[in-house]
Amino acid sequence: MAAAVAAADAATWGECWGFGIYQSDADLELLDLVAEEASAMFPATALDCLRSPLLPANFTLRGPIDKATVIANLNAGIFTRIARRLNHQGNPMAVVILAAVGMELGVVMEKDDMLMIKMTVVKTEMFLEKRAQI
């Protein structure tokens, strides 16, 4: 049964090497989508650390890391704008990926954003291992 679920998920979500977050091609593509959404809202140099600390140290989306700038911009309202835009676009897994990265970076989230994220996680299909990480 678990093998059938894993096969169905792999067919739906692409190559998968684990059941947690950032362990599939789809998650990494969504991480890139989140970075692209953010690039429209603040300078590209600040996107350098919009990646997960769970990924290898040499994996970045855009070169050198400027974590303080990214956190400051996300805390200044960019996180809320990205989350709402992704939610409005109907991309729940992108919202989940954004939330995971935000939590790992230590972004301060508004109560409305937390509620939206919780509701999105509850109604989004994902492996239990991934859900437990979020």
Image (tube, grey):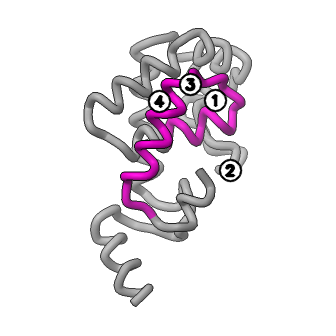
How far is disc 1 from disc 4 in space, using C-alphas? 9 Å
Q: Mark 2 belongs to which amino acid? A: Leu
Mark carried by residue 54? 2
Q: Mark 1 belongs to which amino acid? A: Cys
How far is disc 2 from disc 4 in space, using C-alphas? 16 Å
**Is label 1 or label 3 in front?**
3
Residue shown at the point (67%, 13%) measured from the top left: 72
Residue shown at the point (60%, 26%) measured from the top left: 48
How far is disc 2 from disc 1 in space, using C-alphas? 12 Å
Q: Mark 3 belongs to which amino acid? A: Lys
User: Helix or strand or loop: what does disc 3 sit on?
Assistant: helix
| Position above or below: 65 against 122 | above
Q: Earlier in the sequence, mark 2 or mark 4?
A: 4
- Disc 1 crowd rating (10 Å Cα; few below 14, some 14-19, many 20+) is many
Q: Mark 4 belongs to which amino acid? A: Ala
Cβ–Cβ under 8 Å for marks 1 and 3:
no
| Position above or below: 131 against 28 | below
- Disc 2 crowd rating (10 Å Cα; few below 14, some 14-19, many 20+) is few
Which residues, given as a range, are shown in magenta? 97-126
Asked whether residue 19 is drawn in magenta, I would say: no
Residue shown at the point (43%, 27%) measured from the top left: 83
- Residue 107, horizontal then vertical, whole percent: 66, 26
Q: Earlier in the sequence, mark 2 or mark 3?
A: 2
How far is disc 2 from disc 3 in space, using C-alphas? 26 Å
Q: Which residue is mark 3?
A: 111
Q: Which residue is mark 1?
A: 49
Q: Which residue is mark 4?
A: 35
User: Helix or strand or loop: what does disc 4 sit on?
Assistant: helix
- Residue 102, horizontal then vertical, whole percent: 61, 32
Q: Earlier in the sequence, mark 1 or mark 4?
A: 4
Q: Main secondary structure of the magenta part?
A: helix
